[in-house]
Image (spheres, rainbow, N blue to C red):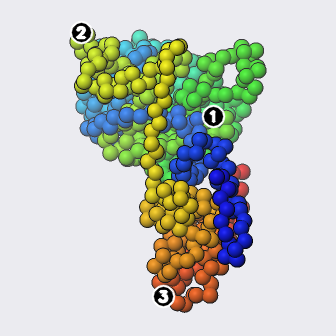
């Protein structure tokens, strides 16, 4: 039964190895029922997604909100619920970062507003302006608490001190950097030294008297209020080499990042301002930078299984600081802070002017020059099991008996209006002592499966070619070859029967997934029909197409090899 004998043309009997092997597999692997031929699967063409890529792609459900003009600044409050301040033209809008709806709007500006930032507790808003004023607002009543008017030109950058709610710092186009005493309502310190517009400022995370500013004169200056007998002055000058658009301190306060032109520079402030790294990863001017102290996936240390608890740090205690940069090329790129390599890149529908990540790393905000504000929220659970800001996030209940977004609490009543009503009980498990009756579902076989079941290899190949799927044809060819019937499937064909085979080979022989297999098929066709070449014009044309495709691929591979040899020294020199 399992090794059918048949007679050869000379009358001698022998066993067919392919048939015997197939019958033996049927006898050992299943109960005699024909198994459908699985479609051949290949490795994915794209590079497998890393944990970093999965993490940043979890920022989904983007909201693209139109603003009155280009979005020059976005900034989150440190305190929950991390409201978002968005500056556009003569308006500063405070958004609820969870619902992405406007919370407060500030429009008491005579001209363009710049750099609206919220205090750490979210109860005050500081804004610069084109006329040089720096104003402090109460976010609840929108009343003006303080107005500083000593700048003679536009105040482009405003920041609260990381250490005190009573200190403000501003950088202006009049080339000065000023520290303001909010309680006294006066300028506490004025720093002079820039020779062009001062466009950015950042406070040191640990030293209350140290500030860094960037200017269009191509320098970054570190200011200290303790020098010159308490009058303040420049303690260090770093030469960026291009107009500086933004500066940021890295966690720990030992290193500083400056962006401008196409360069991102990392400086070591403790070693006298040494340039540690200069990166050029954008195609146009880098306009903004943002440092997220814990803005990446949780790091995995070596030997965590054995030594994770002995080090006194759990996986939830580890942080993953990230540097985000935005450019006029429309890309936001994420850099890890160990080797400062780019771990993720996202494209936005316009030149990026501002970027910010919420302190809990749940909301990503990006402002563009074409009046769009993008707010993305993570759609998965946060660290420590906290509910993320995805579909089940901070929506408000709309009435009694309802949950988030108006959905009912509790399960829906099972009735004929739901699909579950018609499949109820199908997944129930049998209790102990119940009699089990297994139902066999008849497999729906494809035409090539019917032919393979009857060992009609030529019909199986024709049916697979008629379907048009390259993966199915590859699986059928592999199964026929495994059974030893490839010559049988290809032999005995006329020009009309051979043409579909050659057409398929010509179409897919250049595909690396099928090249090796189709090269063997072509060699077998030439062995069988080599003496009949020239009898059919269609077959000859198909063979010429295969020859031309193969020759083109060989030429292309040679050109790529030569290009790789030229590019290798350039890439090696650029990585130094």
Left or right? Give the position of 448 relative to 366: right
Q: Earlier in the sequence, mark 2 or mark 3?
A: 2
Pointers 3 and 1 in contact (CB under 8 A)?
A: no
**Residue 520 image offset from top left, x and y in percent:** 65, 70
Please, what secondary structure does the residue beneath circle 3 have?
helix
Instruction: Characterize the local packing of mark 1: few (<14), some (14-19) or many (20 or more) Cα atoms within 10 angstroms.
Output: some
Give the mark, 2 or 1, whose residue is nearer the N terminus.
1
Q: Read off the residue under disc 1.
A: 337
Q: Residue at x 33, y 25 (%)?
A: 420
As rendered, which of 457 and 408 lies closer to the eye? 457
The mark lying in front, picked from 2 and 1, is: 2
Numbered badge on residue 400: 2
Question: Label 3: few (<14), some or many (≥20) within 10 Å?
Answer: few
The residue tagged 3 is 537
Q: Residue at x 64, y 31 (%)?
A: 255
Vertical position of residue 301 compared to residue 451: above or below: above
Residue 175 is left or right of residue 300, and the answer is left
Q: At which x and y percent is residue 264?
A: 57, 43
Cα separation, mark 3 vs mark 1, equals 65 Å
Q: Secondary structure at mark 2?
A: loop
Q: Residues within 10 Å of mark 2 (few under 14, many from 20)?
A: few
């Amino acid at each position: 039964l399992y090794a059918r004998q048949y007679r050869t043309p000379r009358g001698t009997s022998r066993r067919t190895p392919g048939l015997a092997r197939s019958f033996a597999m049927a006898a050992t692997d299943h109960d005699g029922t024909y198994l459908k031929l699985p479609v051949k699967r290949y490795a994915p063409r794209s590079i497998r997604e890393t944990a970093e890529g999965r993490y940043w792609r979890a920022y989904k459900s983007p909201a693209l909100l139109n603003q009155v003009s280009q979005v020059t600044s976005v900034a989150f409050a440190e305190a929950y619920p991390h409201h978002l301040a968005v500056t556009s033209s003569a308006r500063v809008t405070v958004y609820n970062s969870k619902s992405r709806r406007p919370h407060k709007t500030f429009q008491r500006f005579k001209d363009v507003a710049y750099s609206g930032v919220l205090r750490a507790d979210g109860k005050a808003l500081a804004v610069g302006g084109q006329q040089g004023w720096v104003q402090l607002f109460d976010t609840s009543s929108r009343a003006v608490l303080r107005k500083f008017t000593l700048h003679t030109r536009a105040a482009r950058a405003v920041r609260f001190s990381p250490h005190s709610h009573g200190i403000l710092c501003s950088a202006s186009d009049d080339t000065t950097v000023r520290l303001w005493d909010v309680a006294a309502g006066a300028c506490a310190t004025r720093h002079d030294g820039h020779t062009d517009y001062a466009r950015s400022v950042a406070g040191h995370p640990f030293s209350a008297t140290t500030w860094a500013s960037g200017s269009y004169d191509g320098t970054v200056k570190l200011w200290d209020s303790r020098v010159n007998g308490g009058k303040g002055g420049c303690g260090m000058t770093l030469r960026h080499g291009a107009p500086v658009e933004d500066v940021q301190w890295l966690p720990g306060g030992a290193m500083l990042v400056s962006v401008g032109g196409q360069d991102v520079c990392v400086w070591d402030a403790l070693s006298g301002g040494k340039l540690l790294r200069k990166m050029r990863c954008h195609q146009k001017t880098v306009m903004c930078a943002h440092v997220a102290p814990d803005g990446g996936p949780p790091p995995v240390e070596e030997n965590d299984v054995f030594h994770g608890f002995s080090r006194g740090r759990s996986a939830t205690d580890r942080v993953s600081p990230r540097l985000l940069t935005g450019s006029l090329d429309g890309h936001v790129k994420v850099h890890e802070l160990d080797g400062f390599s780019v771990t993720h890149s996202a494209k936005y529908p316009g030149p990026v002017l501002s970027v910010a990540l919420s302190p809990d790393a749940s909301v990503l905000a990006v402002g563009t020059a074409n009046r769009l504000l993008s707010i993305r929220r993570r759609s998965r659970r946060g660290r420590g099991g906290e509910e993320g800001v995805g579909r089940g996030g901070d929506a408000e209940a709309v009435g009694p008996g309802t949950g988030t977004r108006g959905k009912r609490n509790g399960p829906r009543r099972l009735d004929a209006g739901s699909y579950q009503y018609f499949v109820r009980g199908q997944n129930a498990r049998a209790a102990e002592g119940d009699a089990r009756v297994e139902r066999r579902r008849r497999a729906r076989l494809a035409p090539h499966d019917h032919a393979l079941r009857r060992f009609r290899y030529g019909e199986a190949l024709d049916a697979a070619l008629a379907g048009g799927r390259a993966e199915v044809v590859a699986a059928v060819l592999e199964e026929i070859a495994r059974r030893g019937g490839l010559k049988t499937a290809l032999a005995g064909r006329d020009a009309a029967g051979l043409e579909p085979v050659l057409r398929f080979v010509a179409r897919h022989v250049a595909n690396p997934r099928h090249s090796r297999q189709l090269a063997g098929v072509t060699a077998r066709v030439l062995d069988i029909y080599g003496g009949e070449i020239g009898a059919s014009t269609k077959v000859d044309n198909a063979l010429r197409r295969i020859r031309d495709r193969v020759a083109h691929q060989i030429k292309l591979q040679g050109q790529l090899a030569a290009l790789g040899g030229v590019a290798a020294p350039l890439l090696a020199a650029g990585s130094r």
